[in-house]
Amino acid sequence: MDRPDRVGRKAIIQGYLSKINHDESIDVDAIVADTPRATPAQVMSAITKDSVRRALFANREYVLQEDIDQAIQEQLVGMANPIEDMDPVLLRQVAYHESGHAIVQHYVMPDQRISRVSIVRRSSGTLGYMLPVDTVEMYGQPLRRIVSRIMVALAGHLAVKVFMGEFWTGATGDYNMARMEFRNLAVHGFFGPPVSELYRDVKELQFSDERVERIWVSLEEQIERMLIEHADEVEALTERLLERRDLSNKEVLETLGKNSLQLAQDEGVEMESVLEQIGTSVEGLEYKRRQAKIAASKSDSDSSKANN
């Protein structure tokens, strides 16, 4: 079964909430926002089983928002399996890694919401994670958004290098994701007509193409500049992670500056879609025609005022 859209998820969530005792202040829309990747089975387990278990362990007869939030995390990334005595330097490395992901995510993909940043080991084996979620249902996307995802994937490893002076292990999954996304770009014509190596499985691809390597290095340079520019935020988020271990969307945003979407909202900019904030290509005919109409309208208005 396909994952339900926002309307479907809201109905499913409300249905399962009606079956348990819960605090009346539960924010259904927030749960909907955090679950675009979740299957109906995961939503059911999170609400009717995992959140109830957490409430019972806390000697409560009703479920709180935090119970559901943590239950959703368990379904998506595994149960918390913390390492109580991790060496402080090792823990700091994990915190820098996840902070790097979060900073670049916040600024290059403002159309997404950072649901959680954590340095608590999970049963899946991951030592930490930064979980972004779509704020709109995505059925297609501009290729520049894939490029942004590559930047986010590379940012954790680069943050460790920038702030701790050298690369550490722990980026295998991120690099695999970056290679997958470069493959995605290739088959969609980002590097030119995709006429070669189409028979290969992505695991067999060897990225020796100079065009790919050149863009990869260029993206790494952009990421490093961004991390240095936002060094205060990286440090602040890292320290907060070391203190709290697990941060919600609200706690993350309190630590970071405003991205392009937040600034546009503050200025009251009218937007057809939040996707506008990942950039509108000025090369598109739709953009050029729209600008021409705006210019013509302004010219007619100016002429009218002059005649009056």
Image: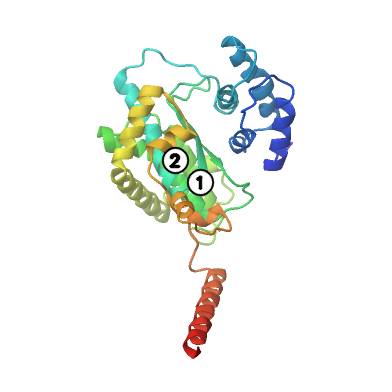
Measure the C-alpha gap from mark 1 to mark 2. 10 Å
- Residue 107 shown left or right of residue 186 in the figure: left
Q: Is residue 232 left or right of residue 101?
A: left
**Residue 5 seen from this side:** no
Q: Secondary structure at mark 2?
A: helix
**Amino acid type, mark 1:** Glu
Residue 224, compared with residue 99, is above or below; it is below
Specify the farthest residue to the front.
308
The residue at 58%/28% (across/down) is 76
Q: What number is the disc on residue 271?
A: none
How far from the left and from the top, in percent, is residue 224? Answer: 31, 45
Q: Nearer the viewer, residue 72 or 161?
A: 72
> Which quarter of the rendering shows the N terminus?
top right
Q: How packed is label 2: few (under 14 Cα within 10 Å), some, or many (20 or more)?
A: many
Q: Tell me if label 1 and label 2 are in contact, CB under 8 Å.
A: yes
Dividing the picture into quarters, in which one does residue 243 lie? top left
Question: Which is nearer the N-term, disc 1 or disc 2?
Answer: 2
In the visual, does 160 lie left or right of 263?
A: left
Of residues 158 and 181, the one nearer the viewer is 158
Q: Residue at x 48, y 34 (%)?
A: 249
- Which amino acid, mark 2? Ala
Q: How many marks?
A: 2
Residue 5 x/y as whole percent: 69, 42
Per the image, label 1 sits on a secondary structure element best described as helix
For disc 1, the marked residue is 181
The circle on residue 153 is 2
Q: Would you identify the image quadrant in which residue 2 lies?
A: top right
Height in image: 56 above or below 297? above
Label 1, residues with CA under 10 Å away: few <14, some 14-19, many ≥20: many
